[in-house]
Amino acid sequence: YNTQAGWGVNVQLPWISRSHYHIHNHHGAKIAERWRINEAGDARVTLRMPLGEQKNLDMLLGVKLPTGRTTVANSDNDIAERTLQPGTGSTDTLLGFAYRAPSAGPHGWFAQALWQHATAVRNSYRPGDQVSIDAGWRYALNADVSAAIQANWQYRARDEGRNAEPDDSGSRMLNLSPGVVYALDRDTQVHAFVQLPVYAHVNGVQLTQGRNVT
């Protein structure tokens, strides 16, 4: 929801649909374990506050709430690892800034930085701090279609706590995301992006993706 003065509030409730399968080596025995997760994750509420009279620079202040479960188990009653769960169990503070460049013909660009920190945790698991920096450029091909490209950088610190795996958590990622935006009408847009890895570093052993499609 946005106001004429430039203030806005954004509420998100993600739906997590995740299938996971791995082989667990337990004292020489190989045990197959599977999970299928389909439920709501952690909700986010973000307030956008304009800084200055031009309304191009915004401060972002928000909270991530522990609405997603952290005890999802499979058919063998084995609880999934915390990083697989739809929720982290933590209440996180969100702080950032977003800048939208003034319109200059068919061109437009933006930049955003966001920091996420777990301020309240439970069950001895604290997800690592996250810092994301995004920058994007957009060019209007005509009144309805625009080409776009984004660079997305994300840093995540190691998780902490008895139920965490600090040796196998934490990462630095840089992705390049070309895409296209189509305006159905003045208020509705459809977009498609392909996120390609440019640089990836993870601590320990972690799964990474070759590409993401939005």
Image: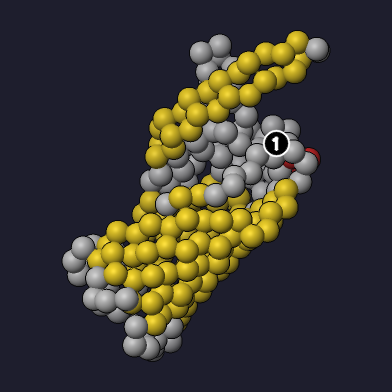
Circle 1 SS class: loop
Q: Nearer the viewer, residue 82 or 145?
A: 145
Horizontal side, residue 78 vs residue 60: left or right: right
- Give the left or right position of residue 152, taking residue 207 as reference: left
| Amino acid tagged 1 | Ala
Tell me what residue is drawn at x 50 percent, y 62 percent. Answer: 177
Which residue of the protein is positioned furthest toward the front in this rendering? 141
| Residue 107 picture quarter | bottom left
Residue 100 visible in image = no
- How far across and how far down the image is residue 137, in percent? 46, 75
**Looking at this rendering, what residue extends furthest in the left direction?**
185
Q: Residue at x 60, y 50 (%)?
A: 118
Q: Is residue 41 left or right of residue 91?
A: left
Q: List the single residue furthest toward the right.
A: 27
Where is residue 134 drawn, in percent x and y?
54, 67
Query: Residue 17, position in %: x, y?
Result: 43, 34
**Residue ID at (56%, 20%):** 34
Query: What residue sits 29% from the left and 69% below the top?
Result: 145
Badge 1 crowding class, 10 Å Cα cut-off, few under 14, some 14 to 19, many 20 or more, is many
The answer to whether residue 62 is seen in the rendering is: yes
Q: Quadrant of the N terminus?
A: bottom left
Question: Colour scheme used in the picture?
Answer: secondary structure
Q: Which residue is mark 1?
A: 164
Q: How many marks?
A: 1
Q: Is residue 56 above or below residue 176?
A: below
Image coordinates for residue 58, horizontal then vertical, percent: 45, 76
- For the residue pair 50 and 200, the one nearer the viewer reads as 200
